């Protein structure tokens, strides 16, 4: 928890710094986002891979950090009832796994393409 929390602080602050201070929220357009993610159909560049890895690390660390925090809170309240604890943890792990996999797939394939496939 300490390591993932510390990493998330630096990753989220660097994200905030890049998006809000360097680029500026009023200068961010959909076209810039499409170019940064490589969703325009052109071959993917190294810079786009770095962006995808950067946000992939944020997604994985945030989900792992959140699941571990949830595990600790649920154990504090329901640790004596091991059946309920296991049920809640199984549901939480499944939900967080689905969200994490969905986020990673969107990063690798492109969120626009995922939305196109989902709408079919």
Image (tube, helix red, strand yellow):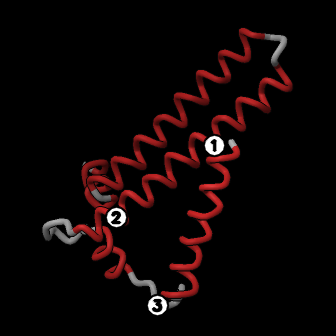
- Image quadrant in which you'd find residue 15: bottom right
In the displayed structure, 102 sits above or below 106; it is above
In the displayed structure, 107 sits above or below 100; it is below
Estimate how packed mark 1 is, as few (under 14), some (14 to 19) or many (20 or more) residues with alpha carbons within 10 Å.
some
Q: Is residue 41 left or right of residue 93?
A: left
Residue that numbered label 3 is attached to: 27
At a point 70% along the width and 46% down the height, the residue shown is 2
Distance CA(mark 2)–CA(mark 3): 22 Å
Estimate how packed mark 2 is, as few (under 14), some (14 to 19) or many (20 or more) residues with alpha carbons within 10 Å.
few
Distance CA(mark 1)–CA(mark 2): 22 Å
Residue that numbered label 1 is attached to: 65
At a point 54% along the width and 37% down the height, the residue shown is 96
Q: Position of residue 107 (x, y in %)?
A: 35, 55
In the displayed structure, 71 sits above or below 44; it is above
Residue that numbered label 2 is attached to: 50
Q: Earlier in the sequence, mark 2 or mark 3?
A: 3
Q: Position of residue 114 (x, y in %)?
A: 30, 52
């Amino acid at each position: 928890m300490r390591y993932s929390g510390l990493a998330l602080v630096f990753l989220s602050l660097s994200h905030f710094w890049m998006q809000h201070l360097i680029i500026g929220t009023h200068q961010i357009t959909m076209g810039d986002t499409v170019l940064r993610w490589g969703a325009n159909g052109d071959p993917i560049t190294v810079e786009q891979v770095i962006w995808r890895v950067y946000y992939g690390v944020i997604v994985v660390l945030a989900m792992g950090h959140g699941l571990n925090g949830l595990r600790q809170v649920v154990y504090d309240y329901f640790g004596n009832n091991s059946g309920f604890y296991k049920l809640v943890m199984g549901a939480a792990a499944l939900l967080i796994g689905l969200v994490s996999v969905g986020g990673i797939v969107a990063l690798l394939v492109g969120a626009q393409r995922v939305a196109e496939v989902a709408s079919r």
